[in-house]
Image (cartoon, grey):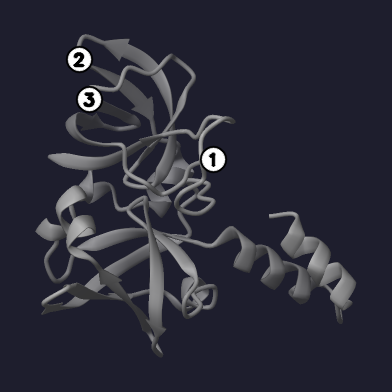
Amino acid sequence: MFTGLIRELAEVGSLHDSSLKIRANHTPKIGDSIAINGACLTVVSLFDGGFEVELSEETRRKVATQNYHGRVHMEPAMRLQDRLEGHIVQGHIDGIGTLTKIQKHPMGSDFFIEAPSEVLRYIIPKGSVAIDGVSLTVNEVLSDSFRLTLIPHTLTSTLFGDYSIGRKVNIETDILVRSIAHLLGRRDSLSWAEVDSILMSY
């Protein structure tokens, strides 16, 4: 599990088939889970100054692998004693979005991200979403996209300040929204007691 708070801007060493080599200050252990641009990957080997993770076929189909070059967002898995400062992020990418518009203003920038309908149905106003592993708040949901407002700190502490129109991004929707939508879709109705129980479990 992750928080959506980036711990390091790491550097891609190479990507070949299922092998992704990352140069980073963080030194994991073999078997550790690490999110690279939001995708939960497993450390399979270590080398001087970095580590190697493996991408399954499912992962390669779901994520924007074209962004695995240069710098990337990196977050090690959350430890039990850590504070949850972002939101609950699994590192399971739901789909790929496209950055269609950036509107700059004095206190940050609005990012508009076009998303597939099967992903957009889980995006809710003022809800949480992880974009390339970064925990963000949804400000507005449109017919085929959603709007995020990024403050200056986020723009400078992540790679978002370098993003341009047309960039593909990894999207992970909020697990709470997905869970409720799944349960509602599988049965006729839920009692308020059941809804409260689901909400309290998070």
Counting residues from the start of the chain, the first of labels 2 and 1 encountered is 1
Counting residues from the start of the chain, the first of labels 3 and 2 encountered is 3
What residue does disc 3 label? 24
What residue does disc 1 label? 1
Q: Amino acid at mark 2?
A: Gly
Residue 61, position in %: x, y?
41, 51
| Residue 106 numbered tag | none
What residue does disc 2 label? 49
Relative to residue 148, is residue 119 drawn left or right? Answer: right
> Mark 1 falls on what kind of element?
loop
Q: Is residue 145 above or below residue 135?
A: below
The C terminus, quarter of image: bottom right
State if disc 2 and disc 3 touch (CB < 8 Å): yes
Residue 188, position in %: x, y?
86, 81
Report the residue at 44% width, 41% height from top: 57
Q: Amino acid at mark 3?
A: Ala
Report the residue at 80% width, 68% height from top: 196
Q: 10 Å neighbourhood of mark 3: few (<14), some, or many (≥20)?
A: some
Q: Is residue 188 above or below residue 177?
A: below
Would you say residue 69 is visible in this rendering?
A: no
Rendered image quadrant of residue 30? top left
> Mark 2 falls on what kind of element?
loop
Relative to residue 172, is residue 165 drawn left or right? Answer: left
Residue nearest the observer in this picture, 125 or 39:
125
